[in-house]
Image (cartoon, rainbow, N blue to C red):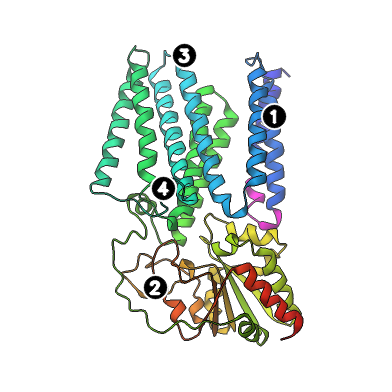
Amino acid sequence: MTLESLLNLVYILSAITFILGFKLMSNPESARRGNIVSGIGMIAAIVATLMFPEIVRYQFIVIGIIAGGAVGLLFAYRTPMTGMPQMVGLLNGFGGLASLLVAWAEFIAHPEQTIFGGGILWLATLIGAVTFSGSIIAWAKLEERFISGKPILYAGQKYVTLLVIAGIVGLGVLFALDAGASNAGGFLVIVTALALILGILVVIPIGGADMPVVICLLNSYSGMAACASGFIVQNNLLIVAGALVGASGIILTLIMCKAMNRSVANVFLGGFGSGAQASTMEVVGEIKPVKSDEAYLMLEAANSVLIVPGYGLAVSQAQHAVRELLEALEKNGTEVRFAIHPVAGRMPGHMNVLLAEANISYDAMVEMDAVNPTMETVDVCMIIGANDVVNPAALEDKASPLWGMPIIEAHRARTVIVMKRSMGKGFAGVENPLFFRNNTRMLFGDAKASLQALVNEFKTGH
């Protein structure tokens, strides 16, 4: 067997590990094994790639591995769970930037291109640039640095975006038809600039409520950019890996859009929660605050408790305090479950990972569709830092930006305890009538401190 045949065999086995890893990650119990299996496959693929005879110098590769590894470790160590969506957004952007640089390196090294080769270079440049600039804006919106997390809208926005797209397509055709000409580089420069602008244009009108969808879609873009890079450097494994990431990202995007009753086009062509519609729903009732000792009495008498976590739980780093409360309730003979909305937090699976970090069993986590039919039997529904995903306006107010979005129907529980710092609105920027319902009690304060106060009440028995 020749060296090339052996290396291609390693590529095939690596591709199999990627697919197997995806399969294992479909189940929470086997997700860690899936990561390990995929990681082993990736290490094997990297080693095999470095053994190809086309690679004659390793200095810059070693520098890149050391520098990239150090930065990655630093990011992973310093980023809290609340910052995980932002970090994922940045990593998506870096993947797009890498593909953009590969396209430009190939063009500089081999300016004479066929129409097909020129088209691939244009496509990799387009996807890579859009992914990079779009991901940077998504990161800035989530981090609320340099730019507001609210939708940014202006007159004629859609027409400007369409004009930029038309320019990219037109210049792409000219570049592909005449890739070897002296002015081809100028075409590619303009395409790169317009694609970077396009990435900004498609993300700025998107509000925080839609960010989970944006992160999924940008992840898909980074995979497609990697796939295009694979065609450029003629690496079969990069094509396969990029296609897997791209396809899985698109599927996850569609799942997230379904969970929010949104279309992908609606997300990118409109600003969610921008105030374009004025809600006509009249909020009735009054806020009924409670203290921790009063909330304790409600929980102590409950046979069943449903906990709905949200981003506020992550902000206060209260997952371990939740675990302590879970143990206290179960010791009291109470059935406890956690209802996880698909878009809770700021990225898919955010709450699941946060709770798992505190060793809360996956068996205790249930999906929205599993709890809504029996919500009337829940004695106490405790909402910790969630807002839009439990807002009844999604079911009752056609003028609300949330209208049609499936929610956890907490308002149908016998008693609702909402833990919040204040009466602030959620990402969608709309009022939540749940807080004013007769069966709702508001426990104001930091989630971690409030949970620890409840745990202490159980420990002392009063």
* Residue hosting label 4: 147
The image's mark for residue 110 is 3
Q: Is residue 22 magenta?
A: yes
Estimate the spatial distance between the alpha carbons at disc 1 and disc 4, rounded to whole Å: 45 Å
**First in sequence: mark 1 or mark 2?**
1
Residue 101, position as x, y percentages in the image: 49, 26
The secondary element bearing badge 3 is classed as: loop
* Residue hosting label 1: 10
- Residue depicted at x 36% and y 44%: 202
**First in sequence: mark 1 or mark 4?**
1
Estimate the spatial distance between the alpha carbons at disc 4 and disc 2, rounded to whole Å: 28 Å
The secondary element bearing badge 2 is classed as: helix
Estimate the spatial distance between the alpha carbons at disc 3 and disc 1, rounded to whole Å: 28 Å
Which residues fall within the magenta stretch?
A: 17-30
Residue 171, position as x, y percentages in the image: 30, 26
Given the image, on which type of amino acid does mark 4 rest? Ile
The secondary element bearing badge 4 is classed as: loop
Instruction: Give the prevailing secondary structure in the magenta stretch.
Output: helix
